[in-house]
Amino acid sequence: MKKQFAIIGLGRFGSSISKELYHMGHEVFAIDIDEKKVNAVKDYATSTYVGNGTDEALLTNIGIRNFDHVIVAIGDDIQASILTTLHVKDFDVPNVWVKAQNDYHHKVLEKIGADRIFHPEKEMGSRIAAYLTSDTVLDYIDLSADYSIIEMLATKKIGGKTLISLDPRKNYSCTIIAIKKQGKVDVTPDPSDPIKVGDILILIGDKRDLRRFREGEL
Ligand code: ATP
């Protein structure tokens, strides 16, 4: 379903989100204080505006209250990020997502009611660390401090075993939610089908249990 997003701040993070959402077919309204940044996303936004996100009158004029989602991607100027978020929340926008610069910024954003807070650099750092420290981890999403979804490559060691013989829930307290075979995702894998070397297992669980699974089976 087509959604309406407003993105305030078009640095690397805001502009790449604008591009992705626009290509996914959503309506994207892109705003930045810097005209050059606005011009750079013209081809990846439904409409654009040069302006200051902290300016309440501007937010009223562009009808910010009519958006389903507002993404505040102002980086270094933490004060501007907080003030913009505060104004947008005052307009009762249901989903206000904000990029945080550090843990203090995160705390303030939480207090003023940001619905979702991103730390792109930190999140990317954890993902890259996971790839670098393992040959079998292909992708990784943090759900919380303790839980993740992880894609792991089936090695020779697991090849030929079945979900029944592995019993990951009982033996590792984690769940295989899907298996990718030759690029196709099977979300209801037959538990008696042997896993092939090169299949990609998608697991959810506590990070420690996922590591136990990887060390025990891959
Ligand atoms: P990124 O990592 O996304 O490149 P960054 O963390 O380096 O971002 P900045 O470049 O400081 O952050 O800010 C992101 C964008 O926000 C910039 O394009 C900047 O012009 C814009 N911006 C800064 N303050 C405001 C504001 N008050 N209103 C609107 N846009 C703003």
Image: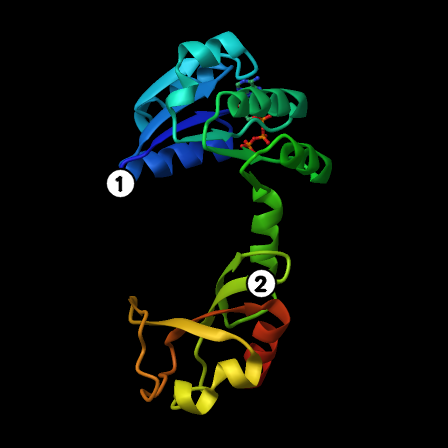
**Residue, x 54% and y 62% (percent of image)?**
148
| Figure check: 210 above or below 78 | below
Quadrant of the snapshot with the N terminus? top left
Q: Residues within 10 Å of mark 1 (few under 14, many from 20)?
A: few
Judge from the rendering whether residue 144 lies leftward or rightward of residue 195; answer left or right.
Answer: right
Residue at label 1?
Answer: 1
- Residue 99: image x %, image y %? 57, 35
The numbered disc on residue 147 is: 2
Task: Looking at the picture, tell me which residue is in the foreground, 6 or 42.
Answer: 6
What color scheme is it?
Answer: rainbow
Task: Looking at the picture, tell me which residue is in the foreground, 27 or 127.
Answer: 27
| Figure check: 134 above or below 83 | below
Give the mark, 2 or 1, whose residue is nearer the N terminus: 1
User: Dividing the image into four equal quarters, which quarter contains ligand 1?
Assistant: top right
**Residue, x 35% and y 83% (percent of image)?**
196
Q: Amino acid at mark 1?
A: Met
Spatial separation of the CA atoms under disc 2 and disc 1: 29 Å
One can see residue 218 in this view: no
